[in-house]
Amino acid sequence: MALLPLSELEAVNIILAGIGEAEVTTIEDVTIEDAQQALNVLRQVSREFQSVGWHFNLEYDYPISVDVNLKIPYPTTAVHVDPMDTESWDLVKRGNFMYDRTNRQFTFPAGTTVKFKVVWLFDFEDLPQAAREYITYKAARRFAKNVMGDEATVQFSQLDEQDAMARFKADEMRRADHNMIHDSWGTYRVFVRRRNTWLG
């Protein structure tokens, strides 16, 4: 049997096992109250964790163009969208669209494309393994505190959570070091400028 990354079902069962609850076989249409609460806490922690913006879910120079109504739609799976520093627009989210605070309007000139820094929200199974582990440990401790009134009753300690975060940050650094020059034209330009300065 192949060893696969942690699934959302497995994460829920780890959370339940942390307080001695029986496993569930599915998270689709969960009817067991504790299992449903465990799933809710897992997803809440995942959203909070991803909202920080990490290398795996942070994208630079992401272009968004006006739609047929000359509005810039807000990406539905994004938690944070902000124009790049190279853009002159002062835009914020209002409803499902970007709002131009300078001109106090939702519409833009035809053909407008703005590049953004975007923090995406991903499903649990689309996250790096190290992120899944950290989210699961943190959710297990929060779940135990919510259900039992004492997070000390969970089998995972704060040290387990800290170790998982250390593994995640090490994984983040490996990914960022490998890709930082190629992921963003802006980053590349800064690198080249500094390299040329060093070389004289």
Image: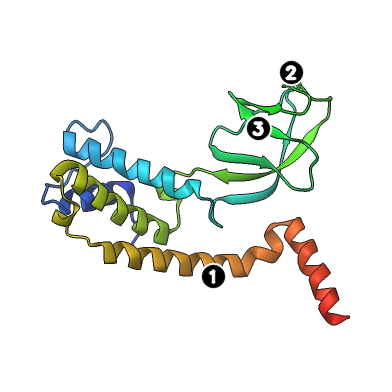
How many numbered marks, from 0 up?
3
- Earlier in the chain: of badge 2 and badge 3, it is 2
Would residue 30 appear left or right of 120 to someone viewing this image? left
Looking at the picture, does residue 73 appear above or below residue 88?
above
Whole-percent x, y for residue 186 in the image: 76, 57
Looking at the picture, does residue 95 appear above or below residue 130?
above
The quadrant of the picture occupied by the N terminus is bottom left
Observer-side mark, 3 or 1, equals 3
The residue sitting at the bottom extreme is 199
Q: Nearer the viewer, residue 150 or 131?
A: 150
Whole-percent x, y for residue 166 in the image: 40, 68
- Earlier in the chain: of badge 1 and badge 2, it is 2
- Earlier in the chain: of badge 3 and badge 1, it is 3
Number of residues whose C-alpha sits closer than 10 Å to that of mark 2, classed few (under 14), some (14–19) or many (20 or more): few
Q: Amino acid at mark 1?
A: Arg
| Label at residue 174 | 1
Number of residues whose C-alpha sits closer than 10 Å to that of mark 1, classed few (under 14), some (14–19) or many (20 or more): few
Whole-percent x, y for residue 170 in the image: 47, 70
The quadrant of the picture occupied by the C terminus is bottom right
Q: Nearer the viewer, residue 71 or 4?
A: 71
* Colouring method of the image: rainbow
Location of mark 3 (residue): 92
| Label at residue 69 | 2
Q: Amino acid at mark 2?
A: Asn
